[in-house]
Amino acid sequence: MTQARNVLVYGASGYTGKLVAESLAQRKMPFYMAGRTLDRLQNALAVVEERHGQKVDAELVIVNHNLGELVELLQRLEIKVLINNVGPFMQLGWPVVEACLEAGVHYLDTTGEQDWTAAIGDKYGAAFAAKKLLLCPANSFMWAAGALAAEVVLETPGIDSLDICYQIDNGLPSEASTKSFLRMVCNDVSQYYLEQNQLKAWPNDVAYKVFVPYRNAQLSAHPWGGACEPIWFKDDPRVLNCKVLTAMGEHLIDPVMQAIRAFNELAPGMTQEQREALTNQMGAQMDQGEPPKDDLDVQRGVIVVHGQGRQITSTYVMNLSAAYTWTGDICAEGAERLLSGKLKNVGFQSPAMAFGHRELIDRFHERGFCSALPARCQGDAQ
């Protein structure tokens, strides 16, 4: 692989941006850290180098958040892969995607926003494909992990329905994640699941009780914005139905449900801009500052995927811990694979379809994040 500096981490001074930079450094990949404020970037680089234990091959670049400056920067630096960490993405992501398309750059981001994922797929997917570029949102625990696990279940012939549950211990949402997820979970009309190839809306103010195979107690779960798996599978001929719930932990579910009820009381009659401003304000009130880096033995997670068809069922349980650190790792892995010519599909793709679900799961098992793949996901009855 070339050691030219062809990767740009945009929004590199934030919580997730620093984790992406750290994962790139672990792979000995040179990269740029980009943002609007030099001192924040300098502080971020210092954190990355402290965690990494040595100097990092990174250059800092300042750029304003507008299309013209972003295009000029990407072209001047000859960037091939941009990793966008600036959210909420539906509010802030548009010039970044447009700049990548104009400059001929592969686009990865760390969103968890279902509406953003659907919007850029519809608007830009064909244009990226025509240029043989990758448009790949949600290189993040939520919702790349479920897509990887779902592909294992879909290896069983006859499976056409997916029921996915994320379970996370001791979740530590960052400021950007808090704002992104609040704007999604408060949305009372567009948190979608897939039913008979049609997107249908969850009610936003209902929590559900779920069971996971390794816990005796019921857990509370929420659609958490609907997830990206229903968007990625809605045009997939293999899949008729797809639902995703997330058991984030009572310490987060309860205050989020309170916020949703408050939003539902205040939002009627508001414009979309006013609704977005309200969820930003609520997110700022809930924010407790930048959390510590997550830990493989504290922030443990499991993704449970049940698959069903006419005559067969199948289940796959994948351990995947340290959600934010893994988010940084899957972004770095995607960049490395793009620069190494290992892209499998162009245009609008999930990470699983862009790079191969078995290849990625094997890689992250080697790196200590997730459980090993089964030889093949077997059905329970035929």
Image (cartoon, rainbow, N blue to C red):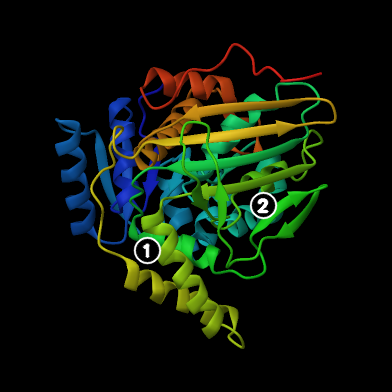
Residue 318: image location, x then y, percent: 51, 28
Looking at this view, is 54 or 230 the one in front?
Answer: 230
Q: Secondary structure at mark 1?
A: loop
Residue 367: image location, x then y, percent: 36, 22
Residue 51: image location, x then y, percent: 18, 36
User: Does residue 21 sit above or below 69 in this rendering?
Assistant: above
| Distance CA(mark 1)–CA(mark 2) | 23 Å
Q: Amino acid at mark 2?
A: Tyr
Tell me if I can see residue 264 in this picture.
yes
Q: Earlier in the sequence, mark 1 or mark 2?
A: 1
The residue positioned 77% from the left and 29% from the top of the image is 159
User: Does residue 253 sit above or below 33 in this rendering?
Assistant: below
Looking at this view, is 329 or 133 the one in front?
Answer: 329
* 151 lies left or right of 291: right
The residue positioned 37% from the left and 63% from the top of the image is 64
Q: Which mark is residue 64?
A: 1
Q: Amino acid at mark 1?
A: Asn
Q: Residue lying furthest front in this view?
A: 216
* 26 lies left or right of 234: left
Q: Which residue is mark 2?
A: 124
Residue 81: image location, x then y, percent: 47, 39
